[in-house]
Image (cartoon, rainbow, N blue to C red):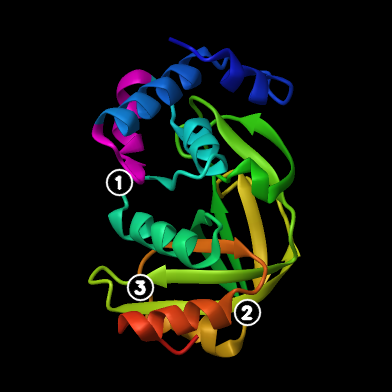
Amino acid sequence: LPSMEFINKFDHTSTHPLTSASKVHTLLKAIIATHHLDAITVECFSLVQKNGVTACLALSDLNDHGVPAGCEGDLVSIAGMMLLREITGHIPWMANLAGIKGTRALFAHCTAPTDLLADFSIQTHFETDKGTAIQGYFEEDRVTLFRLDNKLSRALLATGTITDRPTFPYACRTQILVDLSPNAIKSLKDDPLGNHHLVLPGDHSELIRLALQALGVSLVDG
């Protein structure tokens, strides 16, 4: 059944119907409760291709309520989201690395937690132009960037400053341009650990670095 609380949360920013998105949210909450899950990731492209509905809003809301929730079935990113929540108390935004120019990297995705945004509106999902997705204005200027490798033995950790929050037509709905160190840019180009990266507001690098040392996770040069 659709949740009126969920619909009311997003309705004032949307010209798109929210009933189907709310049903996905209700289903995911039921799965989490039934299986006593600490986190969840959704294979979302098969969902939208088969049913014409996305999980973007549901995942955003779950993150807002303290449940790490990711998309594209990315287990590595979910592991990183769970780890960062335990270390910092905050759930990061899972975003695509969508481009690099000079020392600036573009990160974009349709599932940003609304508690990280100063403002947002509801659009369609970028890749399919179906369902619903979040186009938001990331609130903080200083961010921490994190990514584990698929063996959970190496990690990229970097800090940067948001220089722009564009709405390019060729990337997912919520977008940030982040100015990073030359070493971080080199790592993203020459030694990428994956496409999805986790973005936290603020500088949490020292705390995360100490936790990774304790866990025996080595850092790439970021």
- Would residue 6 be found to the left or right of residue 186 on screen? right
**Of the residues shown, which amino acid type is indicated by label 1?**
Gly
Give the mark nearest the N terminus, 2 or 1.
1
Q: Can you give x and y, in whole percent of width and height, for residue 35 in the image?
A: 24, 34
- Quarter of the N terminus within the rendering: top left
Write down the residue under mark 1: 73
- Would residue 139 be found to the left or right of residue 208 on screen? right
Q: How many marks?
A: 3
**Of the residues shown, which amino acid type is indicated by label 3?**
Leu
**Of the residues shown, which amino acid type is indicated by label 2?**
Leu
Give the mark nearest the N terminus, 3 or 1.
1
Q: Residue at x 49, y 37 (%)?
A: 62
Identify whether 63 is placed above or below 5.
below
Identify whether 24 is placed above or below 74.
above
Residue 137 belongs to magenta span: no
Q: Can you give x and y, in whole percent of width and height, for residue 179 in the image?
A: 67, 75
Q: Nearer the viewer, residue 98 or 76?
A: 76
Give the mark nearest the N terminus, 2 or 3.
2
Alpha carbon distance from label 3 to label 1? 16 Å
Q: Residues within 10 Å of mark 3 (few under 14, many from 20)?
A: some
Identify whether 218 is placed above or below 67.
below
Residue extending farthest to the top is: 1
Q: Can you give x and y, in whole percent of width and height, for residue 83 in the image?
A: 40, 64
Per the rendered image, the range of residues in magenta is 35-51
Q: Nearer the viewer, residue 34 or 56?
A: 34
Q: Is residue 167 visible?
A: no
Q: Are marks 2 and 3 in contact (CB under 8 Å)?
A: no
Q: Are marks 2 and 1 in contact (CB under 8 Å)?
A: no
Write down the residue under mark 2: 180
Write down the residue under mark 3: 193
Q: Residue at x 62, y 31 (%)?
A: 123
- Would residue 202 be found to the left or right of residue 107 on screen? right
